[in-house]
Image (spheres, grey):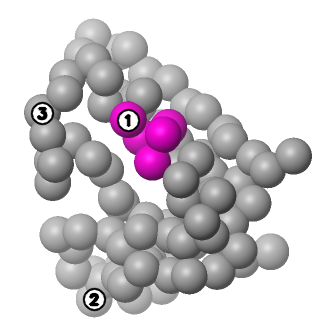
Amino acid sequence: MRVYITGYGLKAPKIQSVGATGAIQAIASLISIENNFIPATIKSNPLNYADLPIVTETNYSEVNKVAITSHGYGGNNSCLLLSKL
């Protein structure tokens, strides 16, 4: 199984949604699973992480699982794993 690392987050490039960022990421991840693509990491220099499989261009391949992490103020952190049935 190949694991890809993407630093794509919707908060910075699209909107400042504060509390809804996690929900928006969940929706975007469901779209990614349904349409089989991994979005590219933005604003990152892959040369600094040459030993990691960082996605620098949108990768169209089968996506079965997505892990989402959300970090908030005061230690309000969560992780969600979405998977195809």
**Disc 1 residue type?**
Ile
Res. 62 image quadrant: bottom right
Whether the magenta-drawn stretch holds residue 25 is answered as yes
Dot placed on the residue nearer the N-terminal end, 1 or 3: 3
Res. 22 image quadrant: top left
Whether the magenta-drawn stretch holds residue 63 is answered as no
For residue 33, which numbered disc appears in the image?
none
Q: Position of residue 18 (x, y in %)?
A: 20, 23
Say what secondary structure mark 3 lies in.
Answer: loop
The majority secondary structure of the magenta stretch comes to helix
Q: CA distance from mark 3 to mark 2?
A: 29 Å
24 relative to 53, above or below: above
Mark 1, Cα crowd under 10 Å, few <14 / some 14-19 / many 20+, is: some
Q: Which residue is mark 2?
A: 47
Q: Which residues are magenta?
A: 24-28
Please indicate whether residue 53 sits to the left or right of residue 15 in the image: right
Residue occupying the far top of the picture = 74
**Disc 3 residue type?**
Gln
Say what secondary structure mark 1 lies in.
Answer: helix
